[in-house]
Amino acid sequence: MTSRRISRRQAIATGLAGAGAAALGGCGDGAGGTAQSPPADRESASQAGQGVRAVVVGAGAFGGWTALELLRRGARVTLVDAWGPGNSRASSGGETRVIRATYGADRIYSEMVVRALELWKEAGERWNDRLFFETGALWMSDGVDPYATDAVPILADLGVPFEELTGEELGRRYPQINPDGIAYALHEKSAGYLLARRGCQRVLEGFLAEGGEYRQAKAAAGTMTGGAMRDVRLATGETIVADLFVFAGGPWLAELFPGFDPPLVSPTRQEILYFGTPPGRPDLTDAELPVWVETGASLFYGVPGSNYRGFKVADDTRGAPFDPTGGDRAPSPEAIRTGRSYMERRFPAMRGAPLIEARVCQYEQSADGHLIVDTHPEAANAWIAGGGSGHGYKLGPALGEMLAAQALGEREKEPFFGLDRFGG
């Protein structure tokens, strides 16, 4: 592929107009067009992909769901991943992810979350495997946080149940929480958490059961000529020729396409901590305590219970640049001190709790923190999906549905996620 640097203003490329057009992969839960719903009967979904050969690189939340949606639309799909879905290097790995529709004034995300939650629940029923846990979600702040209050009319319009609480009301409702310093809380009642790596693995199992092909290999973009991509190259020396390509490589997108300026994504080191609750305390688990996000000098978030893995606490502050392939994933003493200090102040019953697990993952941070879903400026049949930026996992099924429809010409691109927003 070309090595020249690509101006963002050049990134206005048309998508795949139809099956015969052109030549035919968060770790985090932090802050960070309308998503169209398909027919209620998923089995009768569009077959616009009939005859289309597609390759999806990356089996994380974005790539796995996109591959499955393309397959359900009739395409012949090969899904490729270097280490497998939910692996320990992936941004989609780990135990849990928060799902909540509170997204400030960015209505498009709230709409996508509403649709994604429908699809997560539907997937759990289809596969007889619980992937979503409804705990509610608290958005807590030391003042009136516009990110929460701007979301209120959007949540109301979308029918998302919520309530607003003062710090005093929060303390009475949840005595496990020390309300000191909290002035406002938004309680999103239908929110909760998702099983992260299990979700990715379950999508692959469903993809295979429905006739998809999976290859575990490192992949690279292949030849681009005449405004189209022709193939992808595997590290095994094989080449896969196809009509349509999707690159959902998560933190490896900058490695797959190094010519972009600024880079498509910049991986940052993020640390997740799990503390052990006292025995026999359901009030410190998801049985009685919602997931939470707290803004202030820093943004912390957590998942009580975390599918029995412990009391999850994480600092959403963007960490240092990180190599997702060879980076050292040992937890740092500083992160442990910071996380423990926050937890013990806000949840007093957790004082002295042992650290029972920790992991280092990464955010695949785009330049503005928003998703990237667009075609490569030099190949109208090659789509780039990434920039989860610590908040993308929950959106996986809605993004896959949207991207599959766009790539097969069933709907227009969404400018909000386009490359041209970065200028050049």
Image (spheres, rainbow, N blue to C red):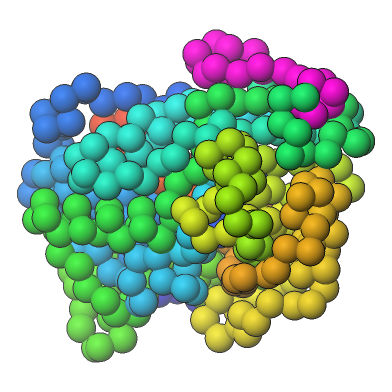
Q: Residue 5 location, x and y as percent?
A: 58, 68
Q: Residue 300 location, x and y as percent?
A: 74, 50
Taking the view exactly as shown, the residue that stands out farthest to the right is 181
Q: Is residue 101 above or below residue 89?
A: above
State whether the magenta stretch is mostly helix, strand or loop. Answer: helix
Judged left or right of residue 197, residue 311 is right
Looking at this view, is 374 or 190 the one in front? 190
Q: Residue at x 61, y 80 (%)?
A: 329
Q: Residue 367 location, x and y as percent?
A: 67, 54
Q: Quadrant of residue 169?
A: top right
Residue 47 among magenta residues: no
Disc tally is 0
Judged left or right of residue 133, residue 390 is right
Q: Residue at x 90, y 36 (%)?
A: 180
Quarter occupied by the N terminus: bottom left
User: Where does the magenta region start and end?
Assistant: 152-171
Q: Is residue 337 above or below residue 83?
A: above
Q: Residue at x 28, y 55 (%)?
A: 202
Judged left or right of residue 261, residue 13 is left
Looking at this view, is 376 or 218 the one in front? 218
Taking the view exactly as shown, the residue that stands out farthest to the front is 280
Q: Residue at x 28, y 69 (%)?
A: 80
Q: Residue 189 location, x and y as percent?
A: 56, 24
Looking at this view, is 329 or 407 the one in front? 329
Q: Is residue 97 visible?
A: yes
Q: Is residue 32 visible?
A: no
Q: Quadrant of residue 407?
A: top left
